Amino acid sequence: MAAELIMTIFAIGFIGSFISGMVGIGGSIIKYPLLLYVPPLLGLAAFNAHEVSGISAVQVFFATIGGVWAFRKGGYLNKSLIAYMGVSTVTGSFIGGYGSKFLSGDAINVTYAVLASIAAAMMFVPKKGIDEQPLDQVTFHKLLASAISLTVGIAAGVVGAAGAFILVPLMLVVLKIPTRMAIASSLAITFISSIGTTVGKVATGQVLFWPAVVMVIASLIASPLGATVSQRMNTKWLQGILAVLILATAVNIWVDVLK
């Protein structure tokens, strides 16, 4: 790869992974559109939707490792929530990741846009009182959590996004999980989910090796930094940042799809 392309991919990976660690997402909601649009805009390589989703899947796997490590202390990781949602999500993400081979690039983009639109709408739903719960007393509906994560896993596996950008809003709005716990636990769930997505993408030849390596290196550096910053920020700011990012991405992808 040319040096300019390496630097561009690294910058995209670093920015996306920093935000990933900060707001509890795998980072694909940032990196997917950036990888799709920025390199060709700069006159560099143009990746198609299958290649972008494949690179994103591998990157998410490593970015979430760094984020979970940074959140390992403080009681933010809900092991029961991670177990129930993780198993369902990895099953769904493998199905989606493998099945995406049979979809067109437009179908993948539309799936991404629909997921981002739903997530954006949910982020603007009032979430009163969720951050007032003691972390050691948080409860949730286990069957509902499993059903949600299975469905999200299938759809997210298609776009290589692992689904954290929609899992966080669902945990906040539907399951009533406190913000910091939702962010930390979603990173762990996304790590589990990304195993299925990555295997599906690699098995079907949708991953470009060197671009994925560059993204992984950027992720391992930036994701823990973002997670550290997250623990010092007001939860309302974290929710607001995530809402704006999801909304902006949804609008951008829909504009491209409708064109």
Image: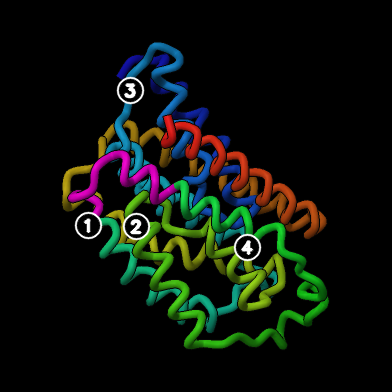
Instruction: Give the residue number, with chain letter if any, for mark 4.
Output: 183
- Circle 2 residues within 10 Å: few <14, some 14–19, many ≥20: many
- Circle 4 residues within 10 Å: few <14, some 14–19, many ≥20: many
> In the image, is 152 to the left or to the right of 199?
right
The percent position of residue 137, horizontal first and vertical second, equals 72, 88
Q: Say if the magenta span includes residue 108.
A: yes
In terms of secondary structure, where does tag 4 sit?
helix
Residue that extends furthest to the top in the rendered view of this protein: 43
Closer to viewer: mark 2 or mark 4: 2
State if disc 2 and disc 1 touch (CB < 8 Å): yes
Instruction: Give the residue number, with chain letter if any, for mark 1.
Output: 98
The percent position of residue 6, horizontal first and vertical second, equals 40, 23
Residue 139 higher or lower than 245, as above or below? below
Q: What is the C-alpha distance between the residues marked 2 and 3?
A: 22 Å
In terms of secondary structure, where does tag 1 sit?
helix
Residue 150 higher or lower than 12, as above or below? below
Q: What is the C-alpha distance between the residues marked 4 and 1?
A: 27 Å
Of the two numbered discs 3 and 4 on the same chain, state the one appearing first in sequence.
3
The quadrant the N terminus occupies is: top left
Of the two numbered discs 2 and 4 on the same chain, state the one appearing first in sequence.
2
Residue at horizontal 42%, vertical 51%? 161
- Circle 1 residues within 10 Å: few <14, some 14–19, many ≥20: many
Residue type marked 1: Tyr
Of the two numbered discs 1 and 2 on the same chain, state the one appearing first in sequence.
1
- In the image, the segment drawn in magenta is 98-112
Instruction: Give the residue number, with chain letter if any, for mark 3.
Output: 46
Instruction: Give the residue number, with chain letter if any, for mark 2.
Output: 157
> In the image, is 187 to the left or to the right of 203?
right
Of the two numbered discs 2 and 3 on the same chain, state the one appearing first in sequence.
3
Q: What is the C-alpha distance between the residues marked 2 and 4?
A: 20 Å
- Residue 206 picture quarter: top left
Q: What is the C-alpha distance between the residues marked 3 and 4?
A: 32 Å
